[in-house]
Amino acid sequence: MRNSSPNGKDNPSLASKPTVTLHGVIHKRKLGSVNFTRCWAEYRDGFGDLTGEFWLGNEVVRKLTSEGTWNLHITMDEAGYAYPKKLRLKQFKIAGDNYTLHVNPLQPWERHYSAGKSFTDVSVGQPFSTYDRDNDADGNANCAAQLKGGWWFKTCTGGVGNVDLVPTNLNGEYSYPVNYTGQDYRGVRWAGALEFGGQILSCRLAIRMT
């Protein structure tokens, strides 16, 4: 399988992807060197550099998570904080032709409930969307085209202070200054708590078989 890198050339690092058997990273961003505003086919097949920033590919992850039980581990570094913020979500998988997200909702007694519930409450059950494949639930706009990147969008905006609808998007524009109080929801962002108010400097999604 061949994949196109941001400069339009074939990327040999993704030509032969390793098989993830028990655990593996499926997404990484850190310096903004890779453009994550990509089409449906690129998110399906994967792009980037496995030694740097990349999206492993929705089809690869769909096949992996179709068997067994997997947890999703989310790690994020935010400007102004010395330690990364981490979340673990259970029963993760993406399924179907539109790569619908499935993960167990966090319960009030679970660790990081306030930090992660906006993601699980909003994105669970949502198909994946890109600028050329609008699968979100917002009837007024194409969230992937408006917010950039590809993600399990539900709505493009949530209203000021409505963190339960404000979209999480770890594939947004890396260098875009995130506004957590207004109506502009572009940028790499995580909705809800985790003390986030500054830019997310790096983020990683990893899966582990339980």
Image (cartoon, helix red, strand yellow):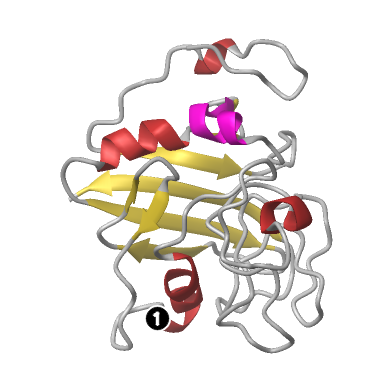
Q: Where is residue 89 drawn, in percent x and y?
A: 34, 63
Quadrant location of residue 198?
Answer: bottom right
Q: Which residue is at 30% across, 81% downward?
A: 110
Q: Which residue is at 41% across, 52% downward?
A: 100
| On screen, residue 132 above or below 3 | below
Q: Which residue is at 51% across, 48% downward?
A: 204
Q: How many discs mark residues in the rendered view?
A: 1
Q: Amino acid at mark 1?
A: Tyr
Q: Where is residue 147 drawn, in percent x and y?
A: 74, 57
Q: Is residue 26 magenta?
A: no
Q: Nearer the viewer, residue 132 or 76?
A: 132
Task: Tell me which secondary structure the magenta stretch mostly adopts.
Answer: helix
Q: Which residues are magenta?
A: 40-47
Look at mark 1 in the image and give the residue it sits on: 113
- Callout 1: helix, strand or loop? helix
Q: Nearer the viewer, residue 141 or 92?
A: 141
| On screen, residue 113 above or below 135 | below
Q: Where is residue 108 drawn, in percent x and y?
A: 33, 88
| Residue lying at the far front of the rendered structure | 139
Quadrant location of residue 71?
Answer: bottom left
